[in-house]
Image (spheres, grey):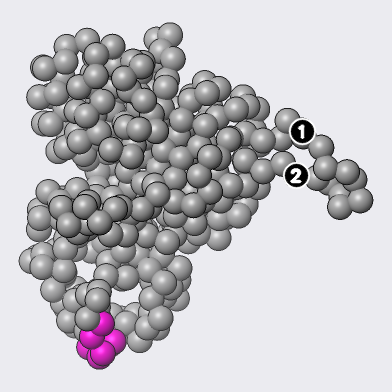
Amino acid sequence: KEILSIISPQSGGTFIDCTFGQGGYSKAILNYPNTKILALDRDSESSKFAGELKNKNKNRFIFHNLRFGDLDKVELKNEKIRAIIFDLGFSYSQIKDYKRGLSFKSEGPLDMRMGLNDFSALEVVNNLDQKDLELIFKFFGEERDSKKIVKNIIRERKIKIIDTQKLVKIINFSKKKNNKKTHNSTKVFQALRIFVNKEISELISGLINAFYLIPVGGVIAVVTFHSIEDKIVKYFFKNYSEVKNSSRYVPFRENNDRCFNLKNRKPIIPNVEELKLNPPSRSAKLRYAVKINNECNFEEFIKKFQNLIDIENLQFDK
């Protein structure tokens, strides 16, 4: 409801759904006449749901099996984009597909690939060196016990390849104390998923490409589910919506450096009703901004998160 109120599909136009999944946003937008959807998803499984939607909306729906970091590869035929939407959470069906290894309940090999990947979590856990694994768990999972966990991983993988349940046992043993609010493995699994899918680089590229693709007056809306994602999106919108003076001795004046109009400085969070209907939405934060300038230099944005990008680019022998 919040997304629809922000992007106003009742006025018609073309919208880009960067994280199609099972088509929740796309279906809701297509309920309004005179709307069109360009949808992306890196997960090939989404093609099944996309096919169904295309059959019902012949000339109003186009699907691309692409990562949203490659948004610039989408061909637009005189389309005036009204809004670009990112929902960074993974779907219920992806969690329940235990072959992916996204869930702590998964049996068998660690995978965590969301589609169009170079390697799996199994390869990372069983091959990456100790120092690099610690960096991944510390910065992508914000895991305090990263050193203990990695030390035990290194020891155990010499004996036997570590699969999903073996990793869960290692984490439980390393942490010892169980946090009742969150599963012991939450942070490590998050870190591995981010690294395997290069989620930081994808998000940064996706946001920048979205800016250049959308016309002035268009909306970019992003739903995040953990603090690292939210920190990136918050900086992107906030930093490029502020008027900056070169010196405190120079009187304040309006300039053309702003790229966005940021109407809500605080994120929109789920209301009580939504939390009852959909408990996993408890960590969701929605931020959005309106483009007001065609020129913008994002070097500062990239530099701000360069350390995370460097960690994502760590190399290892598979």
Dot 2, crowdedness within 10 Å: few (<14), some or many (≥20)? some
Q: Is residue 250 above or below residue 57?
A: below
- Residue 216 image-quadrant placement: top right
Residue at the (28%, 87%) spot, across then down: 175
Q: Position of residue 72 (x, y in %)?
A: 45, 27
Q: Position of residue 169 (x, y in %)?
A: 17, 81
| Magenta-tinted stretch | 173-179
On residue 244, the disc is: 2
Kindly identify which residue carries mark 1. Answer: 255
Image quadrant where one finds the C terminus: bottom left
Q: Is residue 218 left or right of residue 152?
A: right
Q: Secondary structure at mark 2?
A: loop
Q: Is residue 252 visible?
A: yes
Q: Position of residue 182 (x, y in %)?
A: 25, 74
Q: Secondary structure at mark 1?
A: loop
CB-based contact (under 8 Å), mark 1 and mark 2 = yes
Please identify the residue farthest to the front as the structure is shown: 272
Residue at the (58%, 35%) spot, across then down: 261
Q: Is residue 3 left or right of residue 233?
A: left
Q: Is residue 124 above or below residue 234?
A: below
Q: CA distance from mark 1 to mark 2?
A: 8 Å
Please identify the residue farthest to the right as the structure is shown: 249
Pick whichever of labels 1 and 2 is earlier in the sequence. Answer: 2
Foreground of the two, 122 or 188: 188
Q: Position of residue 92 (x, y in %)?
A: 15, 51
- Residue 110 image-quadrant placement: bottom left
